Amino acid sequence: METLDYRFTGTRAVRFPSDAVLVGVLASGNLEILLEPAALDGAMAVRIITAARGFGTTWEAVIADFARRHPLRDVQVSINDAGATPAVVSLRLDQAVETLHAGDGA
């Protein structure tokens, strides 16, 4: 297993519909994405747990693209990729943000 951590400056404040937003089925062994509010001085922190070693550059590109499209402030993003491809992860990240915005009326 490899753990990758990234941090980006956020510009978009969000209101969570509950304590967190989960996309995927927790502990299912499939792709899981969790968004949680966190005191990060306006940043968005992303932690990826992956079984595929050596793909840090690919992950960085996927997450940087996500951060450009969704510059969330004070949000912790946790990803358990379960071997999912970058395209699938990107779609799930967008789904998580849609779920988040559905709860705040945006």
Image (cartoon, rainbow, N blue to C red):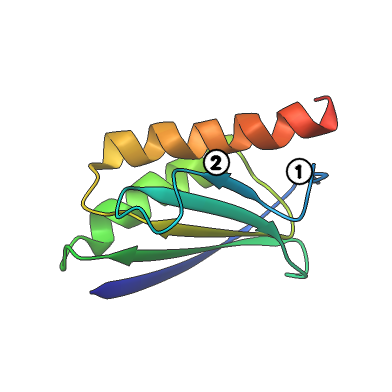
Of pointers 1 and 2, the one earlier in the residue sequence: 1
Q: Is residue 7 left or right of residue 47?
A: right
Is 100 placed above or below 10 here? Answer: above
Q: Residue at left 62%, top 29%? A: 98
Q: In the shown orientation, is residue 24 left or right of residue 44?
A: left
Tag 2: residue type? Arg
The amino acid marked with disc number 1 is Arg
Q: x, y (%) of residue 63?
A: 43, 50
Residue 91 percent across, percent down from the top left: 41, 31
Location of the C terminus (image quadrant): top right
Residue drawn at (73%, 66%), measured in percent from left and top?
Answer: 38
Question: Looking at the image, how many numbered discs can be counted on the residues?
Answer: 2
Helix, strand, or loop for circle 2? helix
Task: Compute the Cα span from label 1 to label 2.
Answer: 11 Å
Q: Quadrant of the N terminus?
A: bottom left
- Which residue in the protein does label 2 denote? 68
